Image: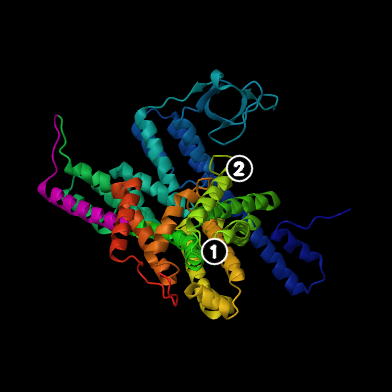
Amino acid sequence: MIHRAPSRPLFWLFSQLNHPTPLGARRVITHFCWLTLLVWFASNEIATAATNEFRTRLHAAILSEDLSEQTRIIQSLIGSPDDSVQQILSSWRGGALYWLELNETKSPVVLDPQVDADGNAKAFRVLDGEIVKGSDGSTQLFSPTELTPVDTTSKLRKVIKDTLDLFSIGNPDPVVRRDAITKIGQARELSLVPHLEARLAIESIPEVQNALKEAIALTQTVNPDAEKRVAAIEQLGTMRSINSLSFLKQLLTPTKGQGATSPDAATLQATRKSVVEIENYMFWGNLFGTVFRGLSLSAVLLVAALGLAITFGLMGVINMAHGEVMMVGAYTAYVVQNLFIRWFGSTGLGFDCYFIAALFCSFIVGAMVGLALERGIIRFLYKRPLESLLATWGVSLVLQQIFRHIFGAANVQVSSPSWLSGSWVIQDVLLAYNRIFVIGIALAIVVGTWLLLTRTSIGLQIRAVMQNRAMASCIGVRTDRVNMMTFGFGSGLAGLAGACLSQIGNVGPSLGQNYIVDCFMVVVLGGVGNLPGTVSASFGVGITDQILQPWLGAVMGKITVLAAIILFLQWRPAGIFVTRSRSLEG
């Protein structure tokens, strides 16, 4: 026979009495065991008594017909350790609390949510939580249509709702507490201020403390005492309370109707000042958030345009399929995600690693597509820019149709791993983790590309070919191999950009067409084949585009940016940074 280990430390202590132990030590253990047993029984009795007390109060409130008495009792239930008290109050407010008459006794009951095939369920008494049983001891089932609901009024339902909200401000989860406090503050019930102040005295989470202060101040804006009202309004302005802006604007709007009164001069002055402070705070916050979104877009443009700048500057090839290579990288991330879901499920550590693998796979697949494109088409069209433009444009159309046939015309969903989900909040500005990661990846790629071009032999050959192809060929540089490797590297960067873009944008067959024009604008504006120029131009185009879009719209914003670039190139045709060359051509 297999004996299970004791599940309680107390039983283990008693078991030690059977072991050979000195008499004095055995007496100490015996006394300690009995003392622990008494404390355990006492604590259980106290908890049971407290639970019974709250249930007794709730039972009395249900039986009472006096609204003021019901209100007093219901509000006294706040802080009950019995979770069923909240459930019963919710049932009472929703009309799911019933009267049950057995043996000429009328008792309130709630029905079990689980019902049988006939729609009948077990009933639980409010007073003691016991299941209703018949005279023979069998469990009885009831249908809601057989029972009479306990009556409620709109005022009583309002009291129950406020009480349930106050239950939530003591929830162990800080997020639940904060949301409940914000909801209570927007209700602006002065009777709830003492409860909020009592919670503030014991709250330890700074975020929840701020929510409590904001809720108290917002509630005090309807205080009849002008001094407290003005102080609360000024405090909301000092706190830069965005949640209170709509309520403060209501104070500035003249109230119409019989018996309506306008706020006094001090209240109006304080309200105007607070509204201006909050709106200025929101303006700068929105501007900062827009700049941050522009940085993330610029990071994607930078990675995509970096490869285009290298290939365009090295070979003079206008690759219109560069955007479709980005699309290939994005779909590669989608395929890797589905493989990890099949192997590890949609959650957990295994799934969270998928995006790291997707980055490597996107680079490799993009580079392979670039190599196939260069070896199969482009190497036959060097020094023929018009033919290479038309050929790569045709390749882009073919790739789009292939991916439409394989994955469908609709966008596909690429989910973020848990470590890229959520946001970092700074002064009410949300900085999404996935956008921060994309910016970091872009900076790392820029550094890596700079090291490749300046610290490696292949980088030296690339720069030599870019400056003077004929001279580099004369001194033994294999220009064909340099072209192939450079085109593959640039296409790999495009695939990497597509994987990054999958975290902040839609993934579909037309993904590349949305960014290819921006990439060419970045390359031309920064200076063809110039790394610092590409970095500067990408951040300029991305941030300017995001700033102009809220004011002018998406289409007019892009048109304005394009017009500004054209005017700039009229003044400086070579771009921001002129690429040095030893060639006598052009």
Query: Which quarter of the picture shows residue 429?
Result: bottom left
Whether residue 545 is visible to the viewer of this picture, yes or no, is yes
287 up-or-down from 471: above or below: above
Q: Decide which of 224, 51 is in the foreground and name it.
A: 224
Q: Is residue 172 left or right of residue 180?
A: right
- Residue at x 64%, y 20% (from the top left corner): 118
- Residue 579 quadrant: bottom left
Q: Which mark is residue 437?
A: none
Quick check: is 277 in the magenta stretch?
A: yes
Q: Is residue 404 left or right of residue 288?
A: right
User: On screen, 163 above or below 301?
Assistant: above
Q: Position of residue 479 (x, y in %)?
A: 58, 71
Disc number for residue 407: 2
Q: Position of residue 246 (x, y in %)?
A: 26, 44
Q: Given the image, on which type of amino acid does mark 2 rest?
A: Phe
Camera-side residue of 431 and 372? 372
Indicate which disc residue 490 carries.
Answer: 1
- Magenta range is 258-287
Q: Amino acid at mark 1?
A: Gly
Residues 237 and 561: in front is 561
Q: Quick one: 330 or 16, which is closer to the camera?
A: 330
